[in-house]
Image (tube, rainbow, N blue to C red):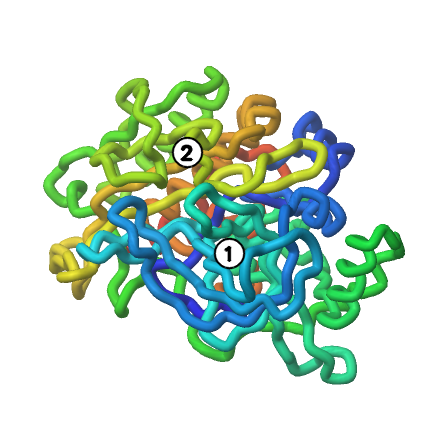
Amino acid sequence: MYNSRLEPLRPMTPFISTFRSALLLALLTAGTASATSYVMVQDDDLHRQAAVVARVEVLTTSQAPTAGTPATDYIVLVERLLKGDVSGTTIVVRVPGGVRADGLALWIDGAPAFESGDRALLFLVPRDDGTYGILHMMLGAFVERRLTGAPEGRPLAVRQLEGAVEVGRGGSGLRLARDWDDFESWLADRSAGRLRDRDYLVPEPSLESPEQFSNLIKYRGNPVRWFEFDDTRKVIWLVGRGSRKAKRAFRRAINAWNKDPDTCVEYRAKGRTSVTAGHSASDGVNAIVFDDPNNSIEGTFSCDGGGVIAAASVWYFLNPPLVQKVPSSKGKGRANVTLEADIVTNDGAACLISGKLKASEQVFGHELGHTLGLDHACGDDASGSCSTPAKLEALMRATFHEDGRGAELSAWDRKWLAKLY
């Protein structure tokens, strides 16, 4: 969409979306329920939950100077403080995911990315290390864009939602953008205690790129894949402490990918683990970790107010790039070697993922597809419109199905899986 697309940071799909509890509970308790990557947080809730709201200009982009989790630092100039206080006119906004000095790369779905010179409205929370995190990942970041078709050519405040999956839009719902100036004014008024209607909302112009859409996750032109399957080895997943229903849904989601008869995918959920590293460290364990124990996702999910439900991450080496030739029986060319993958559910998300087996199954199945190297089939501005029946039926489309099907592969999912395996 409008992402600067620092490639290691290219968002996949965390679990987040946009409706209040009445609709959310209706979706989950009805027979036609679906879970999703995210439940959209309302603007007034974003403002209330954020410690700092600011209009900023991105000055520099660099890898975070830390030996721990790969992260990307954005030094930003605070042009206008709309809520809260900061020390100084420049601050460091740290986004998890990126490339560490030793070449270890971490890709977290839903992590926003910026370029030097970007102007943004950011909803921030302070961290113990003196940096700031973005509240609810990409939901708390709006970038200024001047787009063809915008009302009177005015700048818009737009989110980077290419990698996000939203509940309840059915793949074709109208998405609203924000007039930049009016939205900023509304935020300032809210901080001053002056409440008013959301008069800044405008229809969002089409942002589809004329370039060829890609349905595989790539870095430097090469896809990302597991090579263990080629030697009939299994990729083992361990399941962290969580509800029995969530664990059962995860195992069903794994089986959906394993059952494809034309590919060599062999994921296995082998047992439980007390490991809780998740996105915070590469520990050689592929794990689903519940309740975000390391606070890698800023903000708490609420079945009433929304937020991030879960996020997947993939680890690989870039310096030097760990690239191997794809076996001729599987495809052509070369691919980046996946070293490890993790899925982390947000704290508070148990109200969603423990409530409906099929809903959780579809959530986990979609995220597992990303860990296998698949991007979205359609439904966002990076993948194009859902213009064919095959795309509409895909588990990997950017909007979730609302018919209770769970983790069910379509012809599209199998076709693109076969391009990798």
N-terminal label among 1 and 2 = 2
Against 180, is 66 above or below? above
Quarter holding residue 352: top right
The answer to whether residue 415 shows anywhere in this view is no
Residue 155 percent coordinates (x, y): 69, 77
Q: Position of residue 31 (x, y in %)?
A: 67, 28
Could you tell me the amino acid type at mark 1?
A: Lys
Residue 180: name its quadrant: bottom right
Between the residue at mark 1 and the residue at mark 2, the CA separation in whole angstroms equals 36 Å
Q: Nearer the viewer, residue 291 or 26?
A: 291
Q: Secondary structure at mark 1?
A: helix
Q: 37 or 201, which lies in front?
A: 201
Looking at the picture, does residue 152 appear above or below residue 398?
below
In the displayed structure image, the side of residue 199 where residue 44 appears, left or right: left
Residue type at the position of mark 2 = Asn
Q: Residue at x 51, y 65 (%)?
A: 90
Asked if residue 270 is positioned above or below residue 227 in the image, the reply reads: above
Secondary structure category for the residue under label 2: loop
Residue 157 lies, in percent from the top left, at: 66, 68
Residue matched to label 2: 294
Q: What residue is at 46 percent from the left and 32 percent from the top?
A: 292
Residue 183 seen in the current view: yes
**In the picture provided, is 173 more to the left or to the right than 35?**
right
Q: Residues within 10 Å of mark 2 (few under 14, many from 20)?
A: few
Choose between 375 and 51: the one closer to the eye.
51
* Residue beneath disc 1: 391
Asked whether the beta carbons under mark 1 and mark 2 sit within 8 Å of each other, the answer is no
**Residue drawn 77% across and 60% down?**
188
Residue 321, how many percent across, how many down? Answer: 16, 61
Left or right: where 114 falls relative to 271: right
For the residues carrying marks 1 and 2, which lies nearer the camera in this image? 2
Q: Residue 177 has which mark?
A: none
